Amino acid sequence: MTYTIIITLSILLLLAYVFDISSSKTKIPSVILLLLLGFFVKQISQSFNILIPDLNPILPTIGTVGLILIVLEGALELEFNKEKKSLILKSSIVALLPILFISFGLAYYLFYYESIDLKIALANAIPFAIISSSIAIPSAKYLMKSDREFVTYESSMSDIFGVIFFNFITLNDDISSQAVGLFGFQFVLMLIISFVATLLLAGFLNKIKHHIKFVPMIIILLLIYATSKIFHLPALLFILIFGLFVGNIDELRHIKFIQQFHPDNFTKEVVKFREITTELAFLIRAIFFILFGFLINIDELFNPKTIYYSLSIFAGILIIRYLVLKLFRIPSNPLLYIAPRGLITILLFLSIPESQQLPFIDKSMITQVIILSAFVMMFGLMNNKNKVEKTEEVEEAN
């Protein structure tokens, strides 16, 4: 049995790697193939009466680790300099506005037509409003550079804003001035913790000479994140700040204090750290979506009771995204279609307190919205294929 498990996992992860490579040619998002792979593995196991324990409890843990690594990966890729100032500001606003419009729009519908308490309605609406960077960033790497950068910034900021907003809504019994004040205090406290921890970890990365240092670094990041979450602090903010500082330390070389880190040598270590983070993020992301696909029931996927709501929600997502892009005069093709829901949507849905869960917003609806967003993104990528290929030819010629 041990060797059977090893062989099965190895084959599944190698297939995930093949999907990731082939997506540049087929324009089929690897998440669709991973979900299908997990689903077919379940059908095969049932056909051969293979007994598999309940895997539902481990899904949130794998998803949380995946979220941390994906945000860290994205933050390490982001460039913060004067040239990027306009892009950062614009992508942040474009990330924030749809979260607010979609969340309050859906919450208002639930409040007005379903007589749901507004706070509970918001807790259930927010997961639908957030772009999943775990899908958007890997899919965007085949777009033109300007679009790729925008998607990376936007989806990373969407994760941060969405998680902070979700935690504020779900962790406070009443939305009052006192709750806002407490949240502001927690946010500032997390900034201070992030600043101190980032400097210490950067020093650790720079000074330690042992041949094993990147894995302990990631473990420490996980530890700080989990500890911060226990105290209800916006822990994802720390991951973002750490990644941005480490990834952009060469931009701060003019600061006397930063010179103690020897930016030239430190940058070489960051390159290695980024590589191992990228590979670990791929591994965890693949495991998560294969597992989620395995846990999908055919009845949930084609549930006629929720498909109307799923279509309506996703139509609203596209309409709001289109209007926001037009408002900021950003070309809608292909960015309109690169708004997938995925890992972050699932994680927040699973994190809704039991007292705030709504019976009709269930796994079926979440799954359907994720699949719809993935297929629409696939259409957008395929439609944009010729444009990208021409750009690649020009870049190669230069």
Image: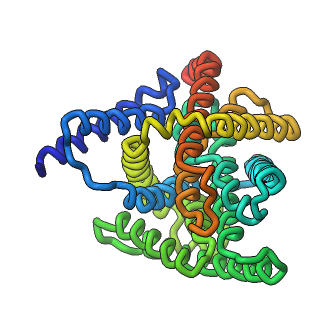
Give the answer, above or below, for where 88 lies relative to 375.
below
Image quadrant containing the C terminus: top right
User: What color scheme is it?
Assistant: rainbow
Residue at 58% in and 34% down? 304
Q: Position of residue 159 (x, y in %)?
A: 63, 55
Seen from this angle, which residue lies furthest right?
327
Which residue is at the front of the view, 291 or 226?
A: 291
Give the answer, above or below, for where 260 lies relative to 69.
below
- Side of 4 relative to 261 (left or right): left
Can residue 312 be seen in the rendering of this structure? Answer: yes
Quarter of the image where one finds residue 234:
bottom right
Count of marks, rendered view: 0
Q: Position of residue 212 (x, y in %)?
A: 30, 66
Which residue is at the front of the view, 191 or 167?
A: 167
Can residue 279 be seen in the rendering of this structure? Answer: no
Give the answer, above or below, for where 353 lies relative to 186.
above
Which residue is at the front of the view, 129 or 313?
A: 313
Q: Position of residue 86 (x, y in %)?
A: 80, 49
Q: Position of residue 317 (x, y in %)?
A: 73, 40
- Side of 105 relative to 138 (left or right): right
Give the answer, above or below, for where 314 lies relative to 129.
above
- Side of 202 relative to 47 (left or right): right
Residue at 73% in and 27% down? 333
Residue at 21% in and 41% down? 8
Residue at 48% in and 73% down? 226
